[in-house]
Amino acid sequence: MTPRDVVFPPGRQALYERNRYSPAIRANGLLFVSGQVGSREDGSPEPELEAQVRRAFDNLNAILQAAGCTFDDVIDVTVFMVDPQAIFERVWSVVPEYWGAAPHPTLTAVGVTWLYGFQFEIKVIAKLPEPTEA
């Protein structure tokens, strides 16, 4: 088995190592990003919902950037929300700040009962940039 090609965003490697997972892995021209929540640098949740969603996107964008991608390279999105019936409209009011113009990526939204103290999580698959020839 070949070693996983892991992508770490700047300044958060210890957090991922402590929790024993990779933030993203490159494979076959794609970037598979683990679910990102609105965690502060120490891993604690951002308390206010809209700020938590923004921080989740900021954490996601840091990983995308570390891999040479932007949100425009995202092709598939899965979001998880605790009590989506109560929070969906508030979450979706923040999304356009990060989502970009159409055509949009595919989306699956899942309602869950627990996200380790968070209310929102986003995971994506992105297309990696084509290698440039030297």
Image (cartoon, rainbow, N blue to C red):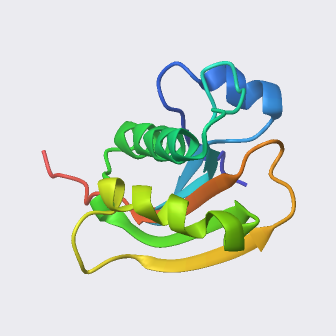
Name which residue lies at 81% across and 42% down: 117
Question: Which quarter of the figure has residue 109?
Answer: bottom right
Relative placement, left or right, of 5 versus 118 is left
Q: Is residue 39 above or below residue 23?
A: above
Quadrant where the C terminus sits is: top left
Q: Is residue 68 above or below residue 128?
A: above
Image height check: is 38 above or below 104?
Answer: above
Q: Position of residue 33 (x, y in %)?
A: 56, 54
Between 59 and 14, the one nearer to me in the picture? 59
Q: In the image, is 31 to the left or to the right of 2? A: left
Say how many tags the image has.
0
Q: Of 51 and 22, which appears nearest the observer? A: 51
Quadrant housing residue 122: bottom right
Give residue 111's position: percent from left, percent from top.
75, 72
Residue at 52% from the left image edge and 70% from the top image edge: 77
* 92 lies left or right of 35: left
Q: Position of residue 74 (x, y in %)?
A: 39, 65
At horizontal 53% and vertical 33% (from top left) the residue drawn is 8
Residue 123: x and y in percent read 59, 59
Q: Residue at x 46, y 47 (%)?
A: 57
- Left or right of residue 36: residue 63: left
Residue 21 against residue 119 in the figure, above or below: above
59 or 66, nearer to the observer: 59
- Quadrant (top left, top right, bottom left, bottom right) of the N terminus: bottom right
